[in-house]
Amino acid sequence: MTDRPVTRIPGAALAGCGIAAAAALLWWATGGPAAQAPRPLGAETALALVVETRGRGPATPAVWDAPAPPVAAASDDPLLGSGLRDTLEALLHAAGEAPEPGLLKARLEGLIGQFFPPQVATRALALAHRYVDYRVALGRLQAPADLRDPQALRQALAARQKVRMAAFEPDEYQALFAADAQMDEYLLARLEIERDPSLTADQKSAALQQAESALAPALQAQRSEAVAHVGLARQTADFDAQGMDATARFNVRSAQYGSEAAQRLAQVDTQDRQWQGRLDQYQAAMGSGSSSARLAQLRSELFTPQEQLRLEGALALRALPAQAR
């Protein structure tokens, strides 16, 4: 099985990206197949959207051959709690790559007890087997020709939705996929608004505000946090481009955010340099034609298990043009 799950990118994290980056990562991160490796296939999404914007009629409806199940209250089933999808992804990651689904499923039997308590282990294993089949089915889907075309994304994600609903019961669907649905709708709304040539700049601004106001308060807070993080990242990128040293960075940040925050950001700078250096090493090995066994060894040497879950998503982001990030 070649479609190894590696990364879950929450919708809130994508909410702070530029439009092109959000569009590309929305597909990469949602489990859609990509044309080249690496292929992060972690965070699934549910997308069904009709956007109304000031100054125009309703947008083109989402293309849904199979509608998403309605959002329901959180399940009190001990198996179908929050974090179920992340747990399944971690389970599959622990099982590693396998040449065919049957072998991967066999490995899961020996690992299931490490990820689920005994009272739900039998059901969890059955669900994990179907999750493997689901991931195989996802690998057969065609990626959108243009990741920045809202209609193309809708059509591709509708095809994925049919696969998802065929694989899981409604309550399983709710636990696995529903949490990110509203944020994903917002991301597609942003993409659609930004690419609509009929809207003026003021109309786009009003439409974006309307789309954001439709988010639940908790998601609006996540969105604000994501935007703040992106602002800090852009400031850091500007510092890098200027060749600004650590002392000058601290002085600027201290004046803007306070000395305590500036110190924490200095620590983040150090950690990020180390992370980027390890990514450089791994990417160089990939480019040199290293064997799968050597790359697996290098992943273990350079990255912790948690970092390995972020690895291919980070490489996918690196592959985007700088202006799209």
Image (cartoon, rainbow, N blue to C red):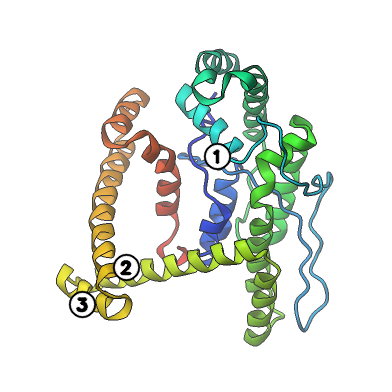
Placement of 187 over or under 278, stated as above or below: below
How far is mark 3 from mark 1, CA to CA? 41 Å
Placement of 169 over or under 96, stated as above or below: below
Tag 2 secondary structure:
helix
Q: In terms of depth relative to the viewer, which is nearer, 140 or 40?
A: 40
Tag 1 secondary structure:
loop
Judging by the rendered image, the residue that carries numbered circle 2 is: 237
> In percent of the image, x 47 and y 39: which residue is there?
37
N-term mark: 3 or 1: 1
Q: In terms of depth relative to the viewer, which is nearer, 29 or 20?
A: 29
Judging by the rendered image, the residue that carries numbered circle 3 is: 251
Dividing the picture into quadrants, the one containing residue 217 is bottom right
Q: Tell me if I can see residue 19 in this picture.
A: no
Tag 3 secondary structure:
helix
N-term mark: 2 or 1: 1
The quarter of the rendered structure image containing the C terminus is bottom left
Which amino acid does the dot numbered 3 rest on? Asn
Dividing the picture into quadrants, the one containing residue 237 is bottom left
The quarter of the rendered structure image containing the N terminus is top right
User: In the rendering, at what x and y percent does residue 181 appear?
Assistant: 68, 52
Q: In terms of depth relative to the viewer, which is nearer, 298 or 169?
A: 169
Which amino acid does the dot numbered 1 rest on? Leu
